[in-house]
Amino acid sequence: MNNLEIINGDALIELGNIKANSIDLVIADPPYNLGKDYGNNHDIQGFDEYISFSRNWLGQAQRILKPTGTLYVFMGFRFISYLYDILDRELQMFFNSWIVWHYTQGIGKTKGFSPRHDDILMFTKSADFKFNLDNVRVPQKYYRQRNNMRGANPGDVWEFSHIHYCNENRQNHPTQKPEGIIERMVLASSNEHDLVVDPFSGSGTTLRVCQQLGRKAIGIELNPDYVAMTKNRLKAEFTGFDSVDPRMERVPMNLRRADIRTEYLENHKKWFLNHHKNVLNTFEESASSLYGESEELGNRNQQKPPQQFDLDFRFSPKSKI
């Protein structure tokens, strides 16, 4: 197969065409069953129908994962406990984390508390799974020479802004996810050249992230308009992922020794902002402001160019992978 594929078809059918035990990572953002309009279908089913749909696609995801594979599932509060039960008790996958995606903007309510988060379940197929902690660490508030300079575990509460309509990377899709969230999942739970599947590809965020991180990827999407959207997105120039954990721009407050500071600031950009060239100026200005220096904090033009992959856009749900 080519490195990136986008399939116009039904997830239940297309997942069934993928070999068992062949996928390293599944990232799924299924319809939440809240009545959103996805162009050619509405996100509204009866309770039993939706649970049956969830059970079927989750079973297929479990089947195609390698024994060392991982599944991430986005879900709203109404159904996430039912998905947890299917994954834990029925499919007997291994629970790892219940991640909270915290965002600052959301639906306003005048009675009750306004929602400001989505939930993400992380399950693995076995107790022996990939997890690259060094690739997803976040900077610490204070530099400690004896500790790992790469920073701390990001934890299970992730703060990423929604992709606002003024963002240049905003697509015409109602539930576009920030690239920074998908970046963390891909870096943590796969290696270069691993194969990632997104059964509900939507605006193509997972494929776009995998394109830049050197992974192979298969996206499945029911709406042909979103398939075309993904095709255009994958051909667009890359200037940096459209979102970043605010902690990634944090400058340690005790880098008083010039030699340690210079080394750390250069490493910081490689470790935490490697695919976020678009926020390097903010980081460098913060460092200069904090330490009162005007020195050049790095060569901004020596970033390794993103690896580009051939694209294979398939529209036949009958074809095999």
Image (cartoon, rainbow, N blue to C red):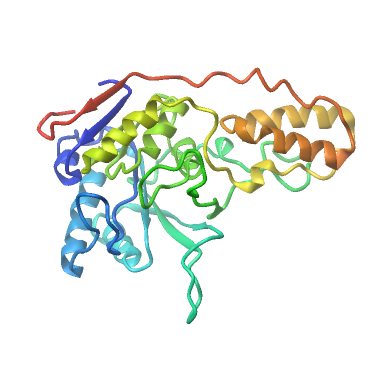
Instruction: Give the image location of residue 93, x and y in percent.
Output: 31, 52
Residue extending farthest front: 166
- For image coordinates 54% across by 43% down, the residue present is 243
Q: Quadrant of residue 182?
A: top left
Instruction: Give the image location of residue 230, x and y in percent.
Output: 33, 34
- For image coordinates 61% across by 33% down, the residue present is 278
- Determine whether, in the image, residue 263 is placed left or right of residue 216: right
Q: Quadrant of the C terminus?
A: top left
- Determine whether, in the image, residue 74 is placed left or right of residue 261: left
* Residue 157, placed above or below residue 318: below
Disc tally is 0
Instruction: Give the image location of residue 36, x and y in percent.
Output: 30, 59
- For image coordinates 35% across by 29% down, the residue present is 232
* Residue 233, placed above or below residue 41: above
The residue nearer to you, when weighing 63 against 257, is: 257
* Residue 203, placed above or below residue 262: below
Residue extending farthest bottom: 111
- Determine whether, in the image, residue 97 is placed left or right of residue 203: right
Instruction: Give the image location of residue 125, x and y in percent.
Output: 32, 45
Q: Is residue 277 visible?
A: yes
- For image coordinates 61% across by 21% down, the residue present is 303
The residue nearer to you, when weighing 92 against 108, is: 108
Q: Quadrant of residue 248?
A: top right
The residue nearer to you, when weighing 291 against 164, is: 164
